[in-house]
Image: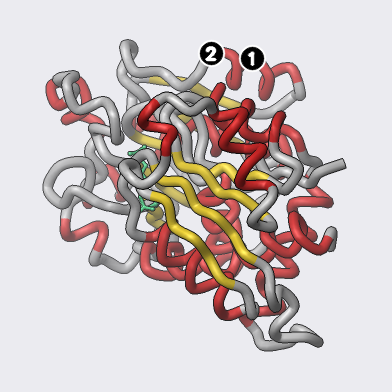
Amino acid sequence: MTRHFLNLDRFDEITLRHMLKRGLDFKGKRAADPLPLRGRILAMIFEKPSTRTRVSFEAGMKQLGGDVVVLGQHDTQLGRGETVADTARVLSRYVDAIMIRTNDPAKLDELAAYASVPVINGLTDTTHPCQIMADIMTVEEHRGPIGGKVVAWSGDGNNVANTWIQAAALFGFEMRLACPANLPPDADIMAWALARGAKIVLTEDPAAAVKGADAVITDAWVSMGFESENRQQFLEPYAVTESLMAHAKPDALFLHCLPAHRGEEVTDGVIDGPWSVVWDEAENRLHAQKGILMWCLEGN
Ligand code: CP
Ligand code: NVA
């Protein structure tokens, strides 16, 4: 079986924790072999922009002894009509793994169906699993095991929110989401998590979601690819401000996958304030993804 990293719902907590531990071993310089991916090549397909995903995967592969090929939106024949399936077949003859950032999750699934090497989800319109692996690593480094904690989301029910819902079902924390009625999380993902017995609360009231929370999270009002929609009017009440943070636990953490739009979804006072762990969170993309790469390429 090819070891794809497509979405958290394909895994159990034990396997995901194994990846996180592996990443932490590299972070703590405890790995027996610091260059386990010598000679391995990761192709990265970007159909949307990226800073963190691009640089953390490239740095991570190189730090583990491997290398990368970066394929931007105008670099491949995908944009000229070559199919995803044919691209998957060809890239599989050259490289050891493929990461893709794309809009439609069906493209990710098609790539995985036709690739004979592992495929990693570097973000779609529906999910962003590498991010939430780094986020869980960050929460646990600062506050210990996430199981039983309360995590609050205030903002668009987007790809990052959807993946937090999946994580809640696997890692056993309560997920409270405050989203505008017209921008809810993915209904199928909600149904999947609830069917698994996850504690998920969906409200339109940010203060109710954040009340007593251990961690508060938000994201851009306008995700990549949704620029034509006028969402500001709906999302302004969901901004994470100092007064919203006052409803959370006094030692609550603030997370944001970044890039942040200061003065929109979060104030400078929060993102630069005592709650914020956003720089550790960004760093942990590097470490969490090393664990994911090791699972995909080495099976451990
Ligand atoms: N958080 C995140 O995925 O950032 P980039 O879009 O910069 O990769
Ligand atoms: N929700 C954001 C995340 C960016 C990393 C987007 O999709 O644009």
Q: Which residue is mark 2?
A: 187
Q: Residue 167, position in %: x, y?
A: 64, 40
Q: Nearer the viewer, residue 69 or 58?
A: 69
In the displayed structure, 249 sits above or below 121; it is below
Q: Which residue is mark 1?
A: 191
Q: Residue 210, position in %: x, y?
A: 40, 39
Q: Residue at x 77, y 58 (%)?
A: 295
Q: Nearer the viewer, residue 242 or 38?
A: 38
Q: Residue 193, position in %: x, y?
A: 67, 24
- Measured in 3D between alpha carbons, the distance from the residue under mark 2 to the one under mark 1, in whole angstroms, is 6 Å
- Tell which residue pokes out farthest to the right in this image: 1
Do residues under tags 2 and 1 come within 8 Å of each other at their CB atoms? yes
Q: Residues within 10 Å of mark 2 (few under 14, many from 20)?
A: few
In the displayed structure, 286 sits above or below 98; it is below
Quadrant in the picture for residue 5: top right
Q: Nearer the viewer, residue 212 or 138?
A: 138
In the displayed structure, 145 sits above or below 198; it is below
Quadrant in the picture for residue 160: top left
Q: Secondary structure at mark 2?
A: helix
Amino acid carrying mark 2 in the image: Ala
In the displayed structure, 213 sits above or below 141; it is above
Q: Residue 101, position in %: x, y?
A: 46, 42
Image quadrant in which the N terminus is located: top right
Quadrant in the picture for residue 78: top left
Task: Specify the label residue 13 is tagged with.
Answer: none
- For the rendered model, the colour scheme is secondary structure
